[in-house]
Image: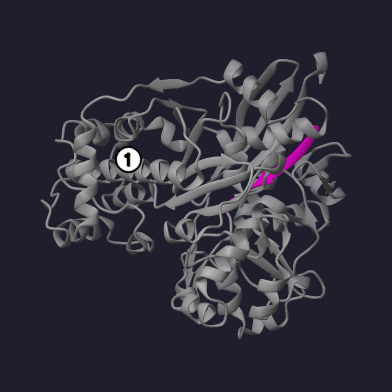
Amino acid sequence: MSGGVKAYAAVDLGASSGRVMVGRVGPGSLELTEAHRFANRPVRVPEGLRWDVLALYRGVLDGLKAVGQVDSVGIDSWAVDYGLLDADGALLGNPVHYRDARTEGVAEKVWATLPAAELYAATGIQYAPFNTLYQLVAARGARQFAHAERLLLIPDLLAHWLTGEQGTELTNASTTQLIDPRTRDWSHEVADRLGIDLGLFAPLRQPGDPAGFLRPEVLEETGLTGPVPVTAVGSHDTASAVAAVPADGERFAYICTGTWSLAGLELAAPVLTEESRAANFTNELGLDGTVRYLRNIMGLWLLQECVRAWGDPDLGVLLREAAAVPALRSVVDAGDAAFLAPGRMPERIAEACRALGQPVPQSRAEITRCILDSLALAHRRAVEDAQRLAGHPVDVVHIVGGGTRNTLLCQLTADACGLPVVAGPTEAAALGNVLVQARAHGLAGDLTDARRLLVRTQPLTRYEPRGDAARWREAESRLTTR
């Protein structure tokens, strides 16, 4: 690349779509363009819900062919799910989707051996029924699991197919509920007590570590000229997205928006108190020794499922109509696991409003407004709870990810939190992915320097809070007093 500019391919896989972006980084410059985008469509088969990982890999190869010559490749994806390999390195079936029903009731069995409070004190990971730990316990009796010699988390599996090398990247490993966030290494105590063989996992990698080179067959199929290195990035997409939060200083909260909303703080150490566990906050590992202290909220999944049920109407029109609906008429708990499974989302939201004794939204616009008000309220609760539990006050909320395009949600979040919201960048995970690769090649500094580069180069929008904070407190009380 001329003028000291290098090109990096960022493979960024979300729960509903994948994309391959190319980031061009030079002294004081950062440009990101999309090379290829493809759907990520899970498949329901008789044995349950599965990821079509071969289609994802096909999309990655097509994307690498579209980007042209690059200096490195990095992969990030959603967390917790994995593929199993046999002794010959062959994949033992399609990876199970985290929304599959196989983990129902598993947590209670785990807690009978290792109480929830002890598990949280050891790992700092919030309860979610699909955590890798619960998936492993659920899979224990399966024939595929009995023949497994290696477990690779989704981005590590794809990197393995690209390079032939195996590793387990740390930020994603921290979501398995098998990592001690204080030592940033495996928790052998937790694994031993639950009978989980940590030997299934490949050696841990840090963001920025080399992860091999594209295999000759991959070079031939993509048209790239080798050697092309693959670099371990913050392979949990939230880790990459938080790395791309354009913050100045430490007094900020972030909300990574998309299918999920991940709302919280960046800290220097985990918060492992019983109060933190009761509030369902998680301590996932980030770049440069940081901890992502956050709460999982159902996110725009609620709206995505409604839009799908309605036959994919024009989203812009729907949001304009929702903006005209009276605010906070009806709200639901956007973090409720009752909304986790796909299907019948408009009806389920109406049922939840009815159960709470609130007006039942009837029209699409009313349901959409209920969802967005509820998400903003959940964002408010997470930001306020995180500050209190961590003793870490903030002055601004940064929203990154796909939700930055939803201007109504951004404004409602500012209103609910009573804090200014800075929205952008939209492709935060891909930008964080690119910046880690650039750091590994000497083109970017620490997190502070990387964030200054983002402020200079990425479009950002600021939303000031408006309205009456008492209305949000009253709406919140409707969810906590019944």
135 left or right, relative to 394: right
Name the residue at 31% across, 37% down.
315
Q: Nearer the viewer, residue 174 or 52?
A: 174
Q: Residues within 10 Å of mark 1 (few under 14, many from 20)?
A: many
x then y, percent, for residue 294: 50, 48
Q: Which residue is mark 1?
A: 376
SS for tag 1? helix
Task: Give how far across and how far down residue 216 sits, in percent.
Answer: 87, 48
Q: Is residue 217 above or below residue 351?
A: above
Q: Residue at x 32, y 29 (%)?
A: 411
Please give the name of the residue rendered at 24% of the width and 56% of the height, measured from the top-left corner. Answer: 480
Q: Is residue 361 above or below residue 3?
A: below
Front residue of 363/458: it is 458
* Relative image position of residue 464 (x, y in whole percent): 34, 22
Q: Which residue is located at x 81 percent, y 37 percent?
A: 224
- Report the amino acid beneath label 1: Ala
Quarter-of-image position of residue 365: top left
Whether residue 68 is visible to the viewer of this picture, yes or no, is no
Classify residue 381 by image quadrant.
Answer: top left
Residue 74 among magenta residues: yes
State the quadrant of the N terminus. top right
In this picture the colour scheme is one colour
Membership of 423 in magenta stretch: no
**Is residue 405 visible in the rendered structure shown here?**
yes
Q: Is residue 481 above or below residue 34?
A: below
- Which image quarter holds the C terminus? bottom left
Q: Nearer the viewer, residue 246 or 365?
A: 246
Residue 87 is left or right of residue 157, and the answer is: right
Per the rendered image, the range of residues in magenta is 70-78
Counting from the top left corner in percent of width and height, residue 152 is at 71, 63
Q: Is residue 482 above or below residue 264?
A: below
